[in-house]
Each structure stands twice: as C-alpha cells, then as structure tokens.
Image (cartoon, rainbow, N blue to C red):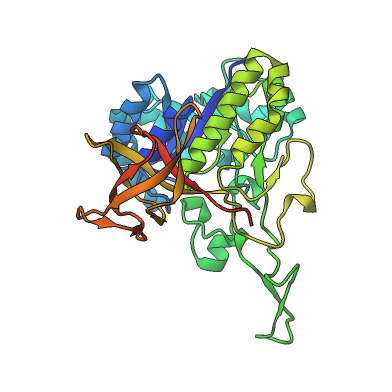
Amino acid sequence: MRHPELLLPAGSLPVLKTAVLYGADAVYIGGEVMSLRAKARNFTPDEMREGIAFAHGRGKKVYVTANIYAHNADLAEAETYFRELKELSPDGILVSDPGLFDLASRICPEIDLHISTQANTTNYASVLFWRRLGAKRIVTARELSVRELTELRRNIPDDMEIECFVHGAMCISYSGRCLLSNYLAGRDANRGACTHPCRWKYAVMEETRPGEYMPIEENERGTYIFNSRDLCMVDHLPDLYDAGVDSFKVEGRMKTALYVATAASAYSRAMRDFETDPALYERNLDFYRELISEGTYRRFTTGFFYGRPDESALIYDSNTYIRSYTFLGIVDEVDGDGRCLFLQKNKFSVGEEIEIMKPGGRILPAEVLSIQNGEGMEVLSAPHPLEQLSVKLSAEADPFDLIRRKEPCS
C-alpha cells in the first residue's frame, strides 16, 4: 500500500508550526511574491527559513508556491526570488507558468519542481510532458474523477508523483483559471489578487431597462449563483489510495490555525486507521466527520471525483461559513505562574468556558480565570483582536496548544 503524504496549507509561520505538530507530513506556503494568495499574510525570507528549519527538524517537508502566470514585468523579480529560494532550500517549488518553470530549473535545479493545479493537467500525456522537462510531481486538475486518476497513474512511471486536493474550497472556474475577478474588479486571479466574485450575490438587469436591478432570490438573503460547496473526501480515502495518489492536499492558505489543526487531525487519523485496518477506518467515519466539522466549512461535496457536479454542489442561500468553534489563539509560551501568553484572534471574557486543543487530538475544557492585556492590566474582557494577552486558565496549557470556544448551535 502506498503511504500518501498529508499536505496542509499555511499562510503564516504560526500556522505552519500548527500544521506540522497536528499531523501534516508536509506544508505548502507562499512567499511575498509570485504566489496566488497575495491577500494571505505569507512568509518573509526569515520566516520561511525558520519554518523550513522547524519542519525539517521534525522530519516534515515544506513546498513553496510560485504559481502565478507571469507577465514580462514579473520575470526579473522571479529570477531574484528563485535565487532566494535556492539559498533557503525548501523541498519543492510549485509552478504553473512554463517560463517560471524554466527559470526555476536553471537557477535551483537541486529543488524538486511541482506543477500546480493552475496548469490544468488532466491527462497522462501532459504528465509525461512535464516529467521529460524535469518535474517531480503533478498537482492534478480538480476536474478529474477517481477513474481518470486511476488511468493516469497506470500510464506514468512510479517515480512521478500525483498530488490532488481532497479538502477545502472549490473554484467556480476551471482549476482556478478564473477571469471573473479581473473583469469585474480589475484584479487578476491568475496573479494572486482574486476578489472571489464567485461568493458574491448577483442581480439581473434587462438591457432595455438600465439601472433597474431585479434580485435573484432563493430566500430573503438572495441567491449566490456561483457559490460552491467545499470539497471533503474524508469518507472516500480508500478510493484515492487505490487510484495511486501520492499526496492528499488540503486547500486553505487564507484559513486559521484552528482550521488547519482540525483538518490535519481528522485526515491524519483517518489515514492512520485505514493503513492499520480498513475496517477500523469504516467504523470511525462518524468520528472523522465530527472532527472535520469543528473547523470552518461551507457544507460538503465530493467535487468531480464521482462525476460531473450538478446543482446540489452549490449553496444558493448563503455565502458564509458554518462555524461551530471560534478560534481564540495559539499559546506562545507559559510563564512561571502558569499563565498562557498568546496573540488574541477573537473576543473572549473572564468566566467563559473555553477548550484547549492539544496536538494529538486531546481536548481539555477550561474556564478563563483572569486576563491581563498587553500593558499588564487586569481586564474582564478582551474585545480587540491581535492584542498580546496573558491569560490564566483552570486547566494546564502548553506552547502550541490552540485555544478555542464552542459556539451555541443556531
């Protein structure tokens, strides 16, 4: 049995560390340029160096995205960037533009090159083409079925790796090659500046009545005609093992550490159970589903894996996430008095019941006993995100634990 890699996203250094500690085999990140997630915080060279050292010290890998479609003005910056990556030595670079592939091949030939899903690789002839040029791995287009993946695997050498998305947001356009953002907002999705117009609410205008907008309504909140459900394949991992997929990829470089931790925990546990005993995996399906639901999501679909999606793969009545937990922060350190020091992400107050989520999946309920703000003053509530806090909890926390609060069911 192949042991696939579990590949998690990280938009910042703390999230990279979370992914590594909560079950990822590898993490993919973006630098300050050449990445399709320009709105993510992304990594400075120093942060990238620290993240790569952190992962390598724990036997994990780091891949760096450089998967924009470049214009002439981008090429000099790309050359400089690849020289920086040569010095930083990540385990792989993701590209989709043939010109950037050629640049990276010449500047840092010792680093594996992976072909991004943006390249729309849908057949084994394309995989063999990229392999002849020196690519190590293909991130297949999201539009492939399990049957097509199986056929692709049978027609390429064993040393050519297949990576495919198993979880996270879907794009309304073909493997992310979207022009809507550029057309509607002047921001190019293929250069990292997507405004996500597939999540917007639209109206209809009749051409002889300019300025008269007629709503398209599923309910009183409107209808979101391009809004896809999120991909989730945790119930179907055996099919992906059988198809010969080498890397199971989770989408989400814009997501929180809590999302990454829950996805890493659920998929790593499911993969471990399946490789131990397929019957154990089947018995625990409800557990994986429950764990996945502790992160943010938009209701789930299996995408193209079992045929072409129909209208049931879209969510017409809302464009918001389902959120059962609110992420409060990652413990940076615990001082001699047992107080947790962390950068607060969302509001919470003294007396609230929260949870401490530990690597490995253990959850400790706790009460917030006291809060000191960044100036060392005792406060009853911490309403301002991104404030450095010192918090006393009723249960013991450790560095890298996640602090979260369960939200009431709506």
Quadrant in the rendering for residue 272: top right
Query: Relative to 328, is 273 on the left or the right?
Result: right
Of residue 15 and residue 383, the one placed in the foreground of this image is 383
Where's residue 16, x and y in %?
40, 35
Of residue 383 and residue 304, the one placed in the foreground of this image is 383
Can residue 40 be seen at all in this image of the molecule?
yes
Where's residue 400, x and y in %?
37, 34
Count of numbered badges drawn on the protein = 0
At 33% across and 46% down in the image, what residue appears?
A: 77
Can residue 95 be seen at all in this image of the molecule?
no
Quadrant location of the C terminus? bottom right
Where's residue 397, x and y in %?
36, 34
At 52% across and 54% down in the image, what residue appears?
A: 189
Quadrant in the rendering for residue 199: bottom right
Of residue 256 and residue 189, the one placed in the foreground of this image is 256
**Residue reaching furthest left?**
375
Query: Relative to 144, is 68 on the left or the right?
Result: left
At 42% across and 34% down in the image, what residue appears?
A: 18
